[in-house]
């Protein structure tokens, strides 16, 4: 008798991030430690952390009582701070009890999906996406469904989203400001999306939840405004990470929260807590929660990022590259001068430049650059981009 082996769960999850693994275990690992490399691949810091951030962390390391470093769930002071922020952001009267602190935005998304999804459910996400949406949906034993954005505009195509919705749809993931394009979804588009999801939920006989992944909402350029879908859609879950506004992604603190417009919130609070414990105590460290009131108003200097965007993106355009002009986030997208973006990325590698090939984020023919590269990297990188372009034009 021939037995056909069913793929293990870990194999299915590995397959969902195979492009990510190939890149970060390959070219990135080889070049990122080379001090001569101009690293535009990811949103990591390349300068020393803000002194005020370090001071705030240091100030809250000194224990005030015997429980200062005891087991922590969601600390009341952190919940209150987030609730005040969300009330100001949305105009709704946010309840601190509806805030669950997590060890980063990554955990916030994972916990939310596992709370909301059942094995028969589908979750829709927009592509090009953040690396891990598909994996986290599959880890929740649900079925991922992608809807394509059109680069470079990346406007919401409501007809495509509507076509992807079925009676099994339980969650739609929206990332705004959008990584990798840098686009902010405006309020008008959010209202139309809310109407679409409301109608679909009524047809299905159950609400479709909107997971709003918004870790870049503080990284706004040119005086742009951000609106959370929680302002207009009652079934919104907000997932946030402080790693972006503080440019400290290794200090893992974020949160899941939901508005007072969601019913049965007592049950929901318990459900989320159960999932946080089942995933290995997905709460942030004590010191970060103690410091959150001081950290909340802090943000990296956006003028530095704007100047860097102006210098780098303008130079690339003058060289002949087609690029986006990001409204927000750390990133801009650049069209590869040859169809194979990974092959062009390898040419850039030879010139000591690291970028993220678009194929890694389902955007073939493009590559992503990060504005968190240092000014020195930018100045070294600009002529390297020109030499690489000349190489493929010869």
Image (spheres, helix red, strand yellow):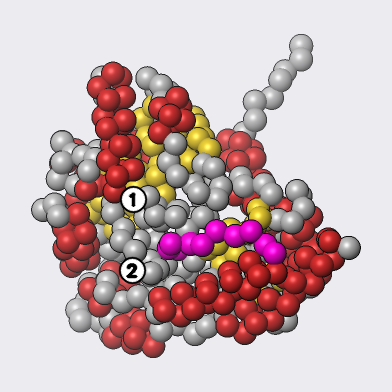
Q: Pointer 2: what residue?
A: 223
Q: Earlier in the sequence, mark 2 or mark 1?
A: 1
Q: Quadrant of the N terminus?
A: top right
Would residue 325 be counted in the magenta stretch? yes
Left or right of residue 157: residue 79:
left
Left or right of residue 96: residue 152:
right
- At horizontal 36% and vertical 81% (from top left) the residue drawn is 53
**Residue 74: image location, x then y, percent:** 24, 59
| 245 lies above or below 192 | below
Mark 2–mark 1 Cα distance, whole angstroms, equals: 14 Å
Q: Name the one closer to the observer, 127 or 154.
A: 154
Q: Which mark is residue 186?
A: 1
- At horizontal 65% and vertical 82% (from top left) the residue drawn is 379
Q: Name the one closer to the observer, 202 or 31.
A: 202
The secondary structure type at the circle numbered 1 is loop
The secondary structure type at the circle numbered 2 is loop
- At horizontal 60% and vertical 41% (from top left) the residue drawn is 16
Left or right of residue 323: residue 219:
left
Q: Quadrant of residue 155?
A: top left
**Residue 91: image location, x then y, percent:** 14, 55
- At horizontal 20% and vertical 63% (from top left) the residue drawn is 85
Q: Residues within 10 Å of mark 1 (few under 14, many from 20)?
A: some
Q: Which residues are magenta?
A: 320-329
């Amino acid at each position: 008798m021939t037995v056909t082996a069913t793929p293990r769960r870990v194999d299915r999850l590995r397959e969902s991030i195979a492009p990510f693994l190939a890149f970060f275990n390959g070219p990135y690992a080889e070049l990122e430690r080379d001090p001569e490399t101009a690293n535009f691949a990811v949103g990591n810091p390349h300068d020393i952390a803000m002194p005020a951030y370090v001071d705030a962390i240091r100030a809250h390391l000194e224990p005030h009582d015997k429980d200062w470093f005891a087991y922590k769930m969601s600390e009341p002071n952190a919940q209150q701070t987030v609730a005040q922020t969300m009330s100001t952001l949305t105009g709704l009267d946010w309840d601190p009890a509806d805030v669950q602190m997590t060890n980063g935005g990554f955990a916030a998304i994972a916990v939310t999906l596992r709370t909301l999804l059942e094995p028969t459910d589908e979750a829709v996400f927009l592509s090009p996406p953040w690396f891990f949406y598909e994996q986290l949906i599959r880890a929740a034993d649900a079925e991922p469904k992608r809807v394509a954005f059109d680069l470079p505009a990346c406007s919401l195509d409501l007809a495509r989203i509507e076509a992807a919705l079925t009676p099994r749809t339980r969650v739609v993931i929206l990332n705004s400001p959008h990584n990798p394009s840098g686009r902010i979804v405006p309020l008008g588009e959010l209202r139309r999306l809310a109407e679409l999801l409301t109608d679909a939920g009524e047809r299905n006989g159950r609400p479709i939840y909107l997971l709003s992944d918004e870790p870049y909402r503080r990284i706004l350029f040119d005086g742009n405004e951000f609106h959370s879908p929680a302002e207009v859609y009652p079934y919104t879950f907000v997932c946030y990470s402080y790693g972006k506004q503080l440019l400290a992604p290794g200090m893992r603190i974020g949160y899941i929260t939901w508005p007072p417009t969601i019913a049965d919130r007592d049950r929901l609070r318990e459900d989320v807590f159960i999932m946080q414990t089942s995933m290995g105590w997905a709460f942030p460290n004590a010191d970060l929660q103690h410091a959150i009131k001081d950290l909340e108003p802090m943000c990296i200097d956006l003028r530095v990022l704007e100047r860097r965007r102006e210098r780098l993106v303008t130079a690339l355009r003058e060289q002949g590259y087609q690029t986006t002009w990001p409204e927000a986030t750390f990133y801009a997208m650049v069209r590869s001068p040859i169809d194979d973006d990974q092959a062009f990325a390898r040419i850039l590698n030879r010139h000591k430049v690291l970028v993220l090939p678009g194929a890694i984020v389902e955007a073939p023919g493009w590559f992503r650059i990060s504005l968190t590269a240092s000014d020195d990297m930018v100045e070294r990188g600009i002529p390297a981009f020109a030499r690489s372009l000349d190489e493929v034009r010869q």
